[in-house]
Image (tube, grey):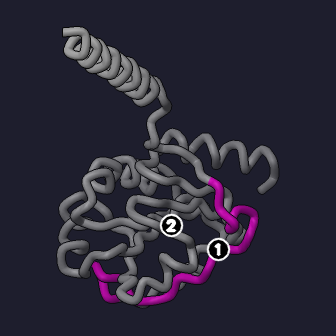
Amino acid sequence: MSGRRRSRRTALYCAIAIGVLMAAFTGVLATRKSAADQQARSPLLGQPAPPIVGNSITTGAPFNLSSLHGHYVLVNFFASWCVPCQQEQPQLVKWDNESSTHAVVGVLFSDTPGPASAFLKSNAGTWPAINDASGQLALSYGVRGPPESYLVNPNGIVLAKFIGEVTASRLDQLVSLAQSAGS
């Protein structure tokens, strides 16, 4: 009888311990800051943006990132199948349209031109988007998965890296800070 009682107590204590650990884990996850719109570290910060050259998947026109010197540019790695990319699209359209000194450039990440072009057209994305079929652009920017974005200043220097969705208001804040700092 004593052996049964001891094994029941052990099982009860184990169940309580697991319950406490699960509650603590849930608490940590529930109170941590969202990954959306988060700036991230990158060796590219303060460095010239890697070149992006190719033909736009939406128009077929040649594109070169250096042609946007003089503008704040958001280089956005995206995919048509990516739910966060779909959710951030209205913010990118808003930011792209609010000033002639802003521009967005899309880079396909593990996607094909047909669905990506249709995605941009159906969501009012009128900016150039470059196919990165070889993955070399993603590699040169250090991208792990979409959406990831890089804010580049008018001199071609990377100001910020974002992992997850980015908002127009956050981009406006960074541009204002950069302008006041003379970047």
Residue 37 rendering spot, x and y as whole percentages: 48, 44
> Looking at the magenta stretch, what is its main secondary structure?
loop
At which x and y percent is residue 140? 57, 79
Is 88 in front, or is 103? 88
Q: Earlier in the sequence, mark 1 or mark 2?
A: 1
Q: Quadrant of residue 118?
A: bottom left
**Is 62 included in the stretch rendered in magenta?**
no
Q: Compared to 102, does 176 lie above or below?
A: above
Q: Badge 2, how many Cα within 10 Å: few under 14, some, many 20+?
A: many
What residue is pinned by disc 1?
A: 49
Q: Identify which residue, 74 or 3, lies in the foreground.
A: 3
What residue lies at 24% left-to-right and 16% top-to-bottom?
A: 3
Q: Which residue is mark 2?
A: 75
Camera-side residue of 171 and 6 = 6
Which stretch did the figure color magenta? 41-60
Q: Is residue 24 left or right of residue 101?
A: left
Q: Is residue 126 visible?
A: yes
Q: Whole-percent x and y of residue 13?
A: 34, 15
The picture places residue 165, in percent across and down from the top left corner, at 41, 49
Residue sitting at 46 percent across and 42 percent down? 35
Q: From the image, which quarter does the C terminus lie in? A: bottom right
Residue 27: name its quadrant: top left
Residue that appears at 77% across and 44% down = 180
Q: What's the amino acid at mark 2?
A: Val
Q: CA distance from mark 1 to mark 2?
A: 9 Å
Quarter of the image where one finds residue 65: bottom right
- Element marked by disc 2: strand
Instruction: Give the left or right position of residue 86, taking residue 46 as reference.
Output: left
- Count all numbered tags in the image, as a single digit: 2
Q: Is residue 111 left or right of residue 28?
A: left
Quick check: is 52 in the magenta stretch?
Answer: yes
